[in-house]
Amino acid sequence: KYHILSPMVDIVSIGAGAGSIGWLEPKTGVLRVGPQSAGADPGPVCYGIGGEEPAVADADLVLGRLNGDYFVGGKMKLDKDKALAAIEKKVARPLKMNVLEAAMAIVDIVDAHMADLVRKVTIGKGYDPRNFHLLAFGGAGPTHVGAYAKDVGVKSAIIPRTAGVFSAFGISGADMVHIDELSDPMIIPPDINRINKNFAELEAGLIKKLKADGFPPDKVKLTRYIEMRYRRQVNGIFCPVPGERLKVDYIGKLIETFDTMYEQQYGKGTAYREAGIEATTFRIVGIGPMSKPPLKKYPPGKADASGALKGQRDVYFSEYKEMRPCNIYEYDLFKPGNSIQGPAIVESPDTTVVIHPNQSAVVDDYLNIILHLGRR
């Protein structure tokens, strides 16, 4: 057997979503959510096609956050009574809770899972989430982002107008990308000619591949990286380097870049240049740019969002500990500049946005919703 290191897309996923099942551990009686999932078939109990275990979507429906008559734009009706009965039987009664408390517990747990994941890919890699905005998409992402984004402490959450079809929208304009690597371990300071030879070899191969894909060399973008590590360590960090031929006087800057990136990921003071530094792998990312779907910019409007208001519905929020009337808005009727004060629900055929009490949102010029999370 041979261990082969190759470039991969760094995607971190979590076993939690609208279909994640709420269940009790047999021995401890502790409520868990996921990783078991009802999937799309039979799906959550509220789908009415055979599901028997209460899922996150059932909890959202019971709490009033989902509109059972407007799921998929009204093409599919959700059965709230079945969701209530399932949560009552499987969660509320065994835990001696009322059904709303049980539904809220399911939602709180799945939101906590999501918050932990965001912390893992930010704080866990040396990034402060307070310096970032969080993008929420999919059907359930905008429904839950108001809770877990606030918990994480990001600046704001952005719900794109294309949230429900965001992955399809993204792939429609995704660039063609090739990544080539060459393993050639060497001690720093290295032989500059050897480094330049490695990059020249990789560049020639990538340009050839992208040309075969229909991208002329003058349209191709190449980005260089050198994987570096302190001696006798296993994991390295890919440091960006300029696109031109390297010169000896750049090595000092390369070392400083590595030290900075190392401390960013592992903590201030962890850099230890005295151990010696080595370069292990040379990488070039070649990008063939594709045309992007045009984004329509709309003329600015007024803050008043009453034109998109379509009624009220009782919704449960943990801040209130009870069902209270909540404004319901139709996403398709929003205008740029519209401002919404929470608590509020924004509905569209492919997603639902939940704006919690003490939160607010504004619609930008491209009809994206910018969710301001309030104080932690």
Image: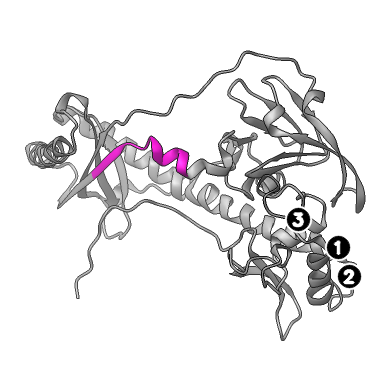
Residue 174 is situated, as x and y percent measured from the top left of the image, at 36, 38
Crowd tier of the residue under label 1, counting other residues whose Cα lies within 10 Å: few below 14, some 14–19, many 20 or above: some
- For mark 3, what is the residue? 60
Alpha carbon of mark 1 to alpha carbon of mark 2: how far?
6 Å
Q: Residue at x 32, y 36 (%)?
A: 175
Q: Residue furthest bottom?
A: 27
Residue 206 is situated, as x and y percent measured from the top left of the image, at 16, 40
Question: Which amino acid type is shown beneath numbered disc 2?
Answer: Met
The reply to whether discs 3 and 1 touch (Cβ–Cβ < 8 Å) is no
Viewed as shown, does residue 285 lie left or right of 165? left
Residue 175 lies in the magenta stretch: yes
For numbered disc 2, what is the local secondary structure? loop
The reply to whether discs 1 and 2 touch (Cβ–Cβ < 8 Å) is yes
- For mark 2, what is the residue? 97
Residue 257 is situated, as x and y percent measured from the top left of the image, at 33, 36
Q: What stretch of residues is rendered in magenta?
A: 168-178
Crowd tier of the residue under label 3, counting other residues whose Cα lies within 10 Å: few below 14, some 14–19, many 20 or above: many
Q: Residue at x 57, y 40 (%)?
A: 163
Q: Residue at x 25, y 60 (%)?
A: 5
Residue 101 is marked as 1
